[in-house]
Amino acid sequence: MADIINRLLQNLCLKCAKDDGIRHYYDVGVIGYGATVASSFGGALAGKDLVSITDVADSPARVLDRIKKVEDGAGGLVEQTVKLPVWFEPIANGGTPMCEALNRARSIISQWVTQHPSSFPPIVINITDGEATDGDPSAAASGLIGLSTSDGNVLLFNVHISGTNQSAIEFPDSEGELPDDYAKLLFRMSSELPEYMRNMAQQESLRVSERTRGFVFQADMTAVIRFLDIGTRPSNLR
């Protein structure tokens, strides 16, 4: 999961790369929650709630060498060494204080939408492997989604990750498809997909409707990657 988040940050940097450098199209924050609720950036960005994508590109905490298999042009695969910038380190410690994390996000975003009232509304992606341990997160989610810019309300998407072999349920449009009360709660907390994201999902051969919400249940790593890509893919960057 940490690798996926770091690749997501790297891909956001690449999407903003122009001839004159990394343009400031995004502000990005990473909140970790467990024993504490705090910014999870490392290195020069440690402790910062929101940073520009330009600063993200300039300030990885470290860079790893990873082996990647690529096509060799003759029907086979060869191994290449690729660089993976690391901004986020995995830490497993404590419970799941989701209410506190969502309230922290609300506090940060409340300031941001005041400063950027005409921008595309912020997107919050909550990734969790368990039930909230500090109460019902519904009110905190509603408070977060209630924030808005002139272009619409904040979008909250939820990803439930699992180590089981069960098939993922991606982008449901009804809680009736979901197997338990916790999954249904996360579904109700999730925003409906905007039209341009529904179009992207359809391009990935996913079944979506106007009622489809940004939620994945029992997500494996493939489903997480696809979900994050659709959830953060820009409609237009100029």
Image: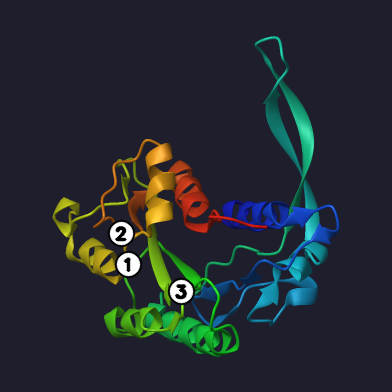
In contact (CB < 8 Å): disc 2 and disc 1: yes
Rendered view: 119 above or below 235? below
Q: Earlier in the sequence, mark 1 or mark 3?
A: 3
Q: Residues within 10 Å of mark 1 (few under 14, many from 20)?
A: many
| Drawn side of residue 55 relative to residue 229, left or right | right
Mark 1 lies on a secondary structure that is: loop
Q: CA distance from mark 1 to mark 3?
A: 18 Å
Mark 3 lies on a secondary structure that is: loop
Q: Circle 2 is placed at which residue position?
A: 213
Q: Earlier in the sequence, mark 2 or mark 1?
A: 1
Q: Nearer the viewer, mark 1 or mark 3?
A: 3
What is the three-letter code of the residue carrying label 1? Ser
Residue 158: where, in percent of width, then height? Answer: 38, 63
Rendered view: 114 above or below 176? below
Mark 2 lies on a secondary structure that is: loop
Residue at the spot 29% in from the left edge and 47% down from the top edge: 208
What is the three-letter code of the residue carrying label 3? Asp
Outermost residue on the left side: it is 176
Q: Circle 1 is placed at which residue position?
A: 190
What is the three-letter code of the residue carrying label 2? Arg
Q: Circle 3 is placed at which residue position?
A: 151
